Amino acid sequence: MAEQAILSARDLDFFYGAAQALRHITLDIPAGRVTALIGPSGCGKSTFLRTINRMNDLVPGTRMAGSLTFQGQEIYAPGLDVTALRRRVGMVFQKPNPFPMSIYDNVAYGPRTHGERRRARLDELVETSLRAAAIWEEVRDRLKKSALGLSGGQQQRLCIARALAVEPEVLLMDEATSALDPISTARIEDLIGSLKERYTIVMVTHNMQQALRVSDRTAFFLSGELVEFSPTERLFSMPRDQRTEDYITGRFG
Amino acid sequence: MKRRIKPAEFAMQTLFLVCGLTAIAFVLLITVYLILAGLPAIREIGLTDFLLGRTWASTHATDPRFGILPMILTSVYGAAGAIVLGVPVGFFTALFLAKAAPPRLAGLIRPAVNLLAGIPSVVYGLVGMCVLVPALRAWLDLPAGDTLLAAMIVLAVMILPSVISVSDAALAAVPREYEEASLALGATPVETYLRVTAPAARGGVAAAVALGVGRAIGEAMAILMVAGNVANMPSLLSSVRFLTTGIAIEMNYAAPGSLQRQALFSIGLVLFFFIMVINILLNLALKRGREG
């Protein structure tokens, strides 16, 4: 199966001050697939995720070395337009974080920021994004109501809709279900399955069952290193590395 | 099981209670005094003539007039002008301090702002009188620089510290997750501050405005020195008299028991009423700000 890599890391190092969070990461994330990043807390999986849309820039004193490219373009190239990158690489956070505005304004925020003013186009984007995030039926009659009145699971799907509204190519999910109840989690997992037809999804998860259920590829991180990166079923059934096996069988982490 | 309270504990608690009650007692005392002292003149002049009369000629020998509309409008316009000039500057300073400033620079600006709050108002008046008033006269080619505009500018500077510190606290309290979400959608930092952070802090900003209005309405000394103090109907470039300065100027020579003196107390009552209303609005704004 020849897959085209949309994101490629080559010998990627990342530092918070003097502390090295990523060591020589080399991997290719295939387009149009779900890639799960797993590993114990502090292993570097979230750091890696946040290098992809450069959210780590918000932390003072960070430094990277090596190469990380998005469709052949160096993400850390000097002079790269970070806002343009983030427009193409959306993100959903661990804790649902809708803005304290109406549901409509939440979804329309991204397009408006990027200059969309036409009412009809905004209406259309809001509806398609909410539909794609499987929340349209629940909110269609209350688009003008505050997003903070939604349940946690609804808020998270709204945040997914908000990310989709800027029409990204990649969607990063940073433990997007860890703050949710099992039913909401299941809904979002279903949603991920339907989104991968149009988007490349990279998700950090603490839940190995979840990685197994929804991802095509799984990368196992440990102490800032990439230990193993394989098709998900193979990684969980026939891990090549002893450390991977120890982790997935629950011997540590 | 009932615990015995030690005598020292009891004594201290009583002391705290007495101190707490003292503050309330003063508020009540002042309220009652102002009402008692302020009502007779209003009754004699007539409420409409007093509040809506356009002429203040308290020392006229044969036909004294006690209309305080010019002063009410001056105080309202003065406070509004101070808000219009001071709040944007204060808010953007706060935005800069809370979000954009490098920590070392913020560490330099914050103490400076606090220092600004500590400067006695008479000093603001002096600087206004010696620098601002002549400058306005020269720039705008006026016969005199003592104007409503000068007072507005001085008030705007005086309300800056409270506007900045209240807005700063409100902006700092905006959850970081909102800003991250906005940045992750490809908004620039400035777009994020203006479209997400600032709206999320609007309760605090409303409180800053109310606080600024309260300070501007209540200020007397500084504007006494720059406003010219003629009880004209206010316009931007004319000499004006505020409610506060109206009292301060005439109290000195108003004969005890005269209608003039009683009318000054009535002005005090009106001022007190204004401040009460603003304080209620302020508390509402703070409460709404806390509830998000």
Image (cartoon, rainbow, N blue to C red):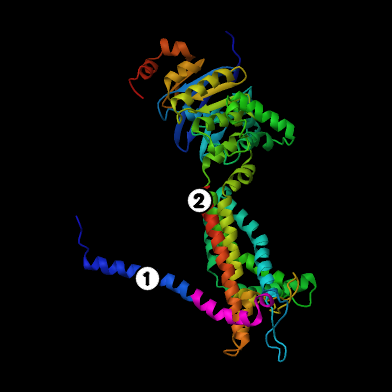
Q: Is residue B164 found left or right of A213 in the rendered image?
A: right
Prevalent SS, magenta region: helix
Residue type indicated by callout 2: Arg
Determine the chain carrying the residue at label 1: B
* Tag 2 residue: B290
* As drawn, B76 above or below A231: below
Which mark sits nearer the N-terminus, 1 or 2?
1
- Depicted B64 relative to depicted B223: above or below: below
Confirm whether residue B248 shows in the render.
Answer: no
Q: Which residue is drawn at 62% across and 19% down?
A: A198
Q: Nearer the viewer, residue B56 or A20?
A: B56
Query: Which amino acid type is shown beneath numbered disc 1?
Result: Cys
Report the disc number at residue B19.
1
Find the magenta span and give its range: B30-50
Q: Residues within 10 Å of mark 2 (few under 14, many from 20)?
A: few
Q: Mark 2 lies on which chain?
A: B
Element class at badge 1: helix
Instruction: Depth check: give the residue in front, B163 or B49.
Output: B49
Q: Where is residue B291 in the image (x, y as percent from the top left)?
A: 51, 48
- Furthest toward the top, the residue is A1
Q: Is residue B40 magenta?
A: yes
Q: Quadrant of residue B234?
A: bottom right
Which residue in the rendered view is the most extreme toward the bottom? Answer: B61
